[in-house]
Image (cartoon, rainbow, N blue to C red):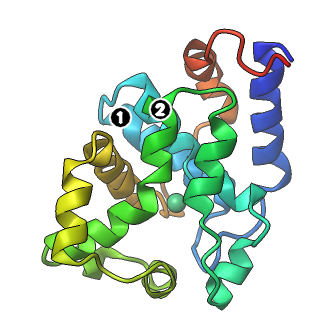
């Protein structure tokens, strides 16, 4: 598989599965992720973190447990399945903030007064399924993680990227950035 084909696979997922409703939010899953990528870019984030924001929920498309199951009360661990799937093409600067973006919500709810109030109703619901706010010990461990800070930045864009009036760039806008981040030989088997 060439690098271009790897990005084609991702673009196809956005087109095919991303058009479905995003569990109770006002935007589709694809719009949500494109907005998150745009917010990261507007904030001047480094390219790997922009890619992480753009791709953070891809695990919803790949897990054996669907997002709808998550809303029904089963944690689909979408952050881990997404990160593991992306690791075939991208390095840890992209995959690890994706892996930690659910933990970052649990972290922010534990350490930041008022953060919980920013969550959408759907995100409040999934928080309980995902383990609720972190304990003090868990939060200290998270804060020390090398990719914890990036995951927290991603998480804030995740929360903001549910705006039906917000700008939604085309996937093509991000293709050069993604191409620049593919690991050498990625996807060749
Ligand atoms: Fe998200």
Residue in view at x 44 percent, y 64 percent: 102
Residue 180 in view, yes or no: yes
In the rendered image, the vertical position of residue 92 relative to residue 3, given as above or below: below
Residue 176 point in image, percent of width and height:
61, 16
Of residues 116 and 20, the one nearer the viewer is: 116
In the rendered image, the vertical position of residue 35 relative to residue 111, given as above or below: above
Residue 154 point in image, percent of width and height:
38, 49
Residue in view at x 63 percent, y 84 percent: 71
Left or right: where does residue 136 sit relative to residue 45? left
In the rendered image, the vertical position of residue 176 relative to residue 75, given as above or below: above
Residue 167 in view, yes or no: no
Residue designated by label 2 = 92
As drawn, the residue found furthest toward the top would be: 184
Badge 2 marks a residue whose secondary structure is: helix
Residue in view at x 49 percent, y 64 percent: 162
Of residues 93 and 58, the one nearer the viewer is: 93
Quadrant assignment for the C terminus: top right
């Amino acid at each position: 598989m060439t690098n271009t084909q790897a990005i084609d696979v991702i673009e196809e997922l956005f087109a095919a599965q991303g058009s479905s409703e995003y569990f109770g939010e006002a935007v589709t899953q694809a719009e949500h992720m494109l907005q998150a990528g745009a917010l990261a870019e507007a904030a001047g984030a480094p390219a790997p973190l922009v890619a992480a924001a753009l791709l953070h929920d891809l695990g919803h498309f790949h897990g054996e447990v669907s997002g709808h199951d998550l809303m029904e009360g089963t944690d689909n661990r979408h952050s881990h399945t997404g990160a593991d799937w992306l690791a075939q093409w991208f390095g840890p600067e992209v995959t690890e903030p994706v892996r930690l973006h659910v933990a970052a919500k649990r972290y922010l709810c534990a350490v930041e007064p008022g953060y919980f109030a920013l969550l959408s109703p759907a995100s409040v619901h999934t928080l309980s399924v995902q383990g609720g706010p972190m304990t003090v010990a868990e939060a200290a461990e998270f804060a020390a993680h090398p990719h914890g800070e990036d995951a927290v930045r991603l998480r804030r864009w995740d929360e903001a990227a549910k705006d039906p009036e917000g700008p939604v760039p085309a996937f093509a806008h991000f293709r050069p950035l993604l191409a620049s981040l593919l690991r050498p030989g990625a996807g060749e088997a």
